Amino acid sequence: MTRAIVALLQIMSDTEDAPLRRRIQATEALLAYEAPQEAVDQAKAFLTSVFEDAEQSVDDRLDALKLMRKAEARKTVPTVTAENARKNRELWRQLENRPSPRKTVQGRFMGGRSKGLGG
C-alpha cells in the first residue's frame, strides 16, 4: 500500500483524535481512487458502521450512505456491440450527406444564388 493510503486508513480508524466528519472525508479520499481491495473493504466496513449506528447524526449517516452507494454502484459504460457500431456509422453517413441547413436557408432567400452581404 502507498503511504497515502496508509495515512488515510489511519485517519479513518482514529476514534480518539479525529472527528467523525474527518474520518468520513478520509474514507471518501480513499474510495475516490484505486486502492487495494483490503483498504476498500476496511473503508466499506467503516461506512457501514456509521450509517447503521442510529446514535450518529443524520448528516453523518447520510454522508456515509452516499459514499457507500458510490462505492457499490460504480458508473457503468455502455457496451458498444458490432450492431450498434454499424448503426452509428450509417447514421453519421446520413448526417454527413445531408445538405447544410444554412445553405438551404440561403438558397430560399437568395433565389439559389450565393451572395455576400454587399451584393
Image: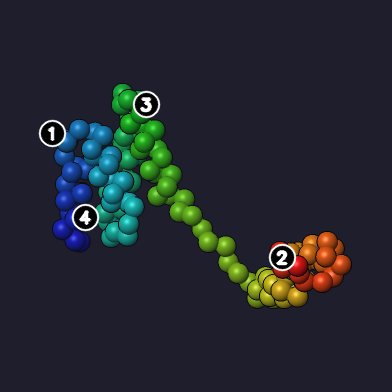
For the residues labelled 1 and 4, the Cα–Cα distance comes to 20 Å
Quarter that holds the N terminus: bottom left
* Residue shown at the point (19%, 61%) measured from the top left: 2
Find disc 2 in the rendering and name its residue: 118
For the residues labelled 3 and 1, the Cα–Cα distance comes to 21 Å
Q: Please give the label number shown on residue 16.
A: 1
Disc with the residue nearer the chain's start (2 vs 4): 4
For marks 1 and 4, give the one nearer the viewer.
Answer: 4
Asked where in the image residue 105 lies, by quadrant, the reply is bottom right
For the residues labelled 4 and 3, the Cα–Cα distance comes to 27 Å
Q: Amino acid at mark 4?
A: Ile
Find disc 3 in the rendering and name its residue: 58
Q: Amino acid at mark 3?
A: Val
Q: Badge 2: few (under 14), some or many (20 or more) residues near its Cα, within 10 Å?
A: few
Is residue 103 toward the left or the right of residue 25 in the image?
right
* Residue shown at the point (77%, 71%) measured from the top left: 114
Q: Amino acid at mark 2?
A: Gly
For the residues labelled 2 and 4, the Cα–Cα distance comes to 67 Å
Disc with the residue nearer the chain's start (1 vs 4): 4
Above or below, 64 relative to 4: above
Asked where in the image residue 91 lies, by quadrant, the reply is bottom right
For the residues labelled 1 and 2, the Cα–Cα distance comes to 79 Å
Disc with the residue nearer the chain's start (3 vs 1): 1
For marks 1 and 2, give the one nearer the viewer.
Answer: 2
Which element type, helix, strand or loop, lies under badge 3? Answer: helix
Q: Please give the label number shown on residue 64.
A: none
Is residue 79 toward the left or the right of residue 41 in the image?
right
Find disc 4 in the rendering and name its residue: 5
